[in-house]
Image (spheres, rainbow, N blue to C red):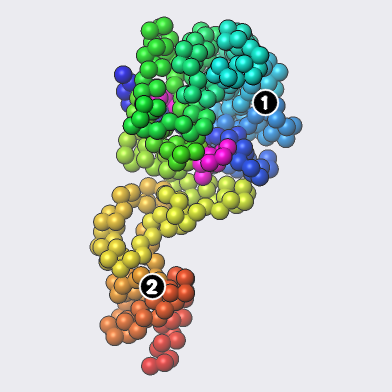
Amino acid sequence: MGSVTPKVSLLDTTLREGEQTPGVYFDVHIKVAIADLLNEIGLDIIEAGHPAVTDEIQHAVEEIAGRNLHARVGAHARSLKADVDLALECGVQFLGIFYCVAEERLTHHSKGLTQAVEQISQVISYAKALKPDLVVRYTPEDAVRSSFENVIFAASEAAHAGADVISIADTTGFMIPGTKHNLYDYVSRLKDELAKRSLSPRIAVHCHNDRGLALANALDGYRAGAEIIDASVMGLGERAGIVDLAILLAVLVNDFNARDDLRLNKLPELYHLVSKYSGLPIPVNFPVIGENAFTHCAGVHTQAALKNPLHYQSLDPSIVGRKSKIALDHMSGLSAVRYSLDQIGEENTDRAFALRILEKVKEVGQRGRTVDLTELKYIVRYLSEQS
């Protein structure tokens, strides 16, 4: 069986998988800014795009690969020599080659398994011959719904041809922890079968979120010994997207002690950048990064949280450079109002006046708004004038 790796490598694919989100496209100067932030955070691999798709994407991949980042810059490619040539012209250090070996897809392409695997192996050998230090990943697309025998045959031959990484792609978000279709068992079985053949490529997991289980599946794979996990900012990607980067990093750092070299305090800046230029807002209740992720509202919650935020938080917001907040609305209690009054320099307010302020705050909250500190100052001034 597999075992947890001491240090997992992290691959961000916001600039490749993320651009497969309908309507999302980043101009080259924004892509460079995103890549720079990913590099600052400490990502190991930045998948910058699929150069064969458009000339603009090819140019962006070339620009990012030329920045001499600490992270490896990667490109995506079909199992075609022409795709490999374009990627290597961009100067990438990592190349992901994919080919599905599910029987239905092979039939669709009018190819037998042996013919398909020969093509995969030839393209990998070709890429390694052109650039021996290139890290090559082979992905049997939709691996988890394909015949395992087909996957292990293709993965073994890919490794023999020089593939450094085999990526298990849950392309449709099919896997469910705790069922017979789970990624822990799949990763363990694949590693064992490769080991029997004296092969030890690194194993990556690429999990889609169609059932809302991408993160759970990725962690299942990691626990079984996967060495690389794919993610994207806001979980951007095809359909329901993939594993969200910030949530993944927070869990790996806080709960698995998997990395101590990441600058998670840069995540809010990265997320605001991607959100602005993707045109997609960050949901307020989004874990780790959402506006309300560390905001306490209900009276009982705020009273306890003011004494110790961990009464109602399992994650310290400082891990991502944030602080706990108290919201003022119709659910607020006196302790929340007093805390907020202290924040605006009104710490000497007597109880009777504080209760009047609370009444006004609740009145505003019942209209579906929260009272921020600026509005609280206006409320204090207004009620003072009414006394």
Q: Quadrant of the N terminus?
A: top left
Q: Amino acid at mark 2?
A: His
Structural crowding at the residue carrying mark 1, measured as other residues with C-alpha within 10 Å and reported as few (<14), some (14–19) or many (≥20): many
Residue 67 image offset from top left, x and y in percent: 61, 33
Identify which residue, 80 or 341, lies in the foreground: 80
Residue 370 picture location, percent across and down: 44, 70
- Whichever of callouts 1 and 2 sits on the residue coming sooner in the sequence is 1
The answer to whether mark 1 and mark 2 are in CB contact below 8 A is no
Q: Tell me the magenta residue range.
A: 225-241
Residue 330, numbered circle: 2
What residue did someone put label 1 on? 90
Q: Residue furthest right?
A: 55
What is the number of the mark on residue 21?
none
Q: Amino acid at mark 1?
A: Cys
In this view, 173 is above or below 96:
below
Task: Answer with left or right where residue 321 lies relative to residue 21.
Answer: left
Element carrying mark 2:
loop
Give me the C-alpha separation between circle 1 and circle 2.
56 Å
- 303 in the magenta segment: no
Q: Is residue 97 visible?
A: no
Q: Residue furthest bottom?
A: 387
Figure label count: 2
